[in-house]
Image (tube, rainbow, N blue to C red):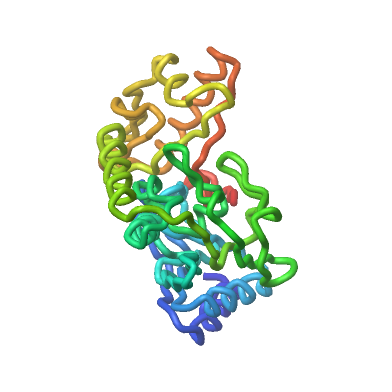
Amino acid sequence: MTGALAQLFDNLGGLDGRLLRNEPMARHTSWQVGGPAAVFFRPATIDGLTAALELVCEAGIPWLVVGAGSNLLVRDGGFSGLVLCTRDLDRLSWAQDGAVRAECGVPLPKLARASADRGLAGIERLAGIPGTLGAAVAINAGAAGQEVGQTVRRARIWAQQGGCRWRDRAELAFAYRHSALTGREVVLEAELAFRQSDPDRLRQALTAALAARRSSQAVEGANAGSVFRNPEGYKAWELIDRAGLRGQRIGNAMVSRIHCNFIVNLGGATATEIESLIDLVQTRVERQYGIRLLPEVRIVGSHVETGQREH
């Protein structure tokens, strides 16, 4: 560990949370692959998260915020800076009008079920998305005709230049799997507003959404959900299937035979194998159809072979 990293580690020790060195990121991603984070911190409070962000930026050290790790591929060489995990930032505060103020680490399934139980409609069909609210707001996660951005009233954002401030829905500029937020901005918490509805009907819709997701996405191994965005006018899985890539393997990484927009870890896969398969799918689809598939997943870290960092 370099002097700067060692100093950062010592400084983070004064904050409330769990602090680790050389923590394998395979433990914190749904693909179950990835090398170690040089420093790993799981803050207990939002204030702890923002304090850690200020410390790492002052030190000039690379950083990465991770929620459930369900939309992330960490390369086998690991991440040479600070990984901040938001899993303990999962508090909900309900208002009398049915709006909720939720911290960034709240699991989306938990929020979907809690709102449905209160007769609040808007995200019940998102119960099968395994990520946390912070990431869901940042990418405007959606499924079955619903998107998180449709319910967001405002969100409190930390920015590397400008500190913390609330931004309303218009400023966030939600679009398909997109918001105005950059990679150097972090969702700390959000206020969501819902429509009143019948709790039993919402629970039924939630259960149906979960069943449909399980039946269509009961894939063969650990995965990160949909790997590619749907190009306008197309479905990514159909392009992948038509390109003859269903069941395509590189090592122990495989394009799912059940849902072609999933890449699964059959057991013992490496991040390099998964990334190579992503590249192969992009190349083959572009060659055959002239369409470049854009990943939904974020790829970070160092290659073991070269040590070249990308984040």
> Quarter-wise, where is residue 215 in the image?
top left
Q: Residue at x 48, y 57 (%)?
A: 194
Q: Residue at x 29, y 36 (%)?
A: 212
Please, is residue 160 above or below residue 170 in the view? below
Please, is residue 37 above or below residue 300 in the view? below
Q: Position of residue 70 (x, y in %)?
A: 41, 50
Q: Position of residue 288 (x, y in %)?
A: 53, 12
Outermost residue, bottom side: 14
Q: Position of residue 181 (x, y in %)?
A: 65, 54
111 vs 98, nearest the viewer: 98
Please, is residue 57 above or below residue 30 in the view? below
Q: Is residue 88 visible?
A: yes
Please, is residue 13 above or below residue 253 in the view? below
258 left or right of 277?
left
Q: Residue at x 53, y 50 (%)?
A: 300
57 vs 45, nearest the viewer: 45
105 vs 12, nearest the viewer: 105
Q: Residue at x 54, y 65 (%)?
A: 191
> Quarter-wise, where is residue 292 in the image?
top right
Q: Is residue 35 visible?
A: no
51 left or right of 250?
right
Q: Position of residue 20 (x, y in %)?
A: 41, 73
